[in-house]
Amino acid sequence: MRLVGLNGDQIGVVPIEEARAQAESDGLDLVEVAPKANPPVAKVMDFGKFRYDQQKRTRENKKKQHTVAVKEVRIRPSIGDHDLETKMNNAIKFLKDGSRLKISLRFRGREMSRQDLGTLLLDRVVEILSDYAVVDKSPVIEGRVMTMFLMPK
């Protein structure tokens, strides 16, 4: 097995028993770094400190990453003007917070025969939100629901 010392210096190819003895004499652990290499590579290190540093790095990376939430606004084709205005005010809040927005337009009963009204309503929604968002995914009908996704500008 190829042995790497504490400071990253190459010790060379040695038998496993000799590598273990080297690690024990230093009071450290022998950690296999690359088991599939030919010959396998092992490093003399403090394994507890190594795991701690790894966990610390993953925590730091988690802090830096930003997840985008998807907020949903549900409307109906027969929605009133004031109700639509209220829903759009909530949608504007979501977009200002940086969330993606899913607009769901649910058809019930005979409304399915007037899907053109749903398309017109979604066009109106896009027009209202044009200062705050752009269309990410254009309207798609899945069963009785027409959905559209918007991204904040």
Image (cartoon, helix red, strand yellow):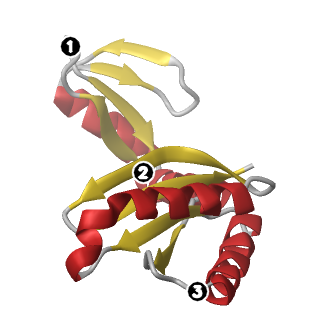
- Please give left or right for residue 149 compared with residue 134 in the image: left
Q: Amino acid at mark 3?
A: Gly
Report which quarter residue 8 is drawn in. Answer: top right
Across and down, in percent, residue 90 comes to 68, 81
Q: Which residue is mark 2?
A: 139
Q: Which residue is mark 1?
A: 39
Across and down, in percent, residue 107 comes to 30, 74
Is residue 65 at least partly visible in the picture?
A: no
C-beta proximity under 8 Å, tags 2 and 1: no
Report how far apart the C-alphas of labels 2 and 1 lie in the structure. 57 Å
Q: Earlier in the sequence, mark 3 or mark 1?
A: 1
As helix, strand or loop, the secondary structure at mark 2 comes to strand
Mark 3, residues whose alpha carbon is within 10 Å: few (<14), some, or many (≥20)? Answer: few
Across and down, in percent, residue 148 comes to 46, 56
Report how far apart the C-alphas of labels 2 and 3 lie in the structure. 21 Å
**Residue closest to the eye, 12 or 22:** 12
Is residue 119 at least partly visible in the picture?
A: yes
Q: Earlier in the sequence, mark 2 or mark 3?
A: 3
Mark 1, residues whose alpha carbon is within 10 Å: few (<14), some, or many (≥20)? Answer: few
Q: Which mark is residue 80?
A: 3
Viewer-side label of 2, 1? 2
Report which quarter residue 31 is drawn in. Answer: top left
Q: Residue at x 68, y 88 (%)?
A: 82
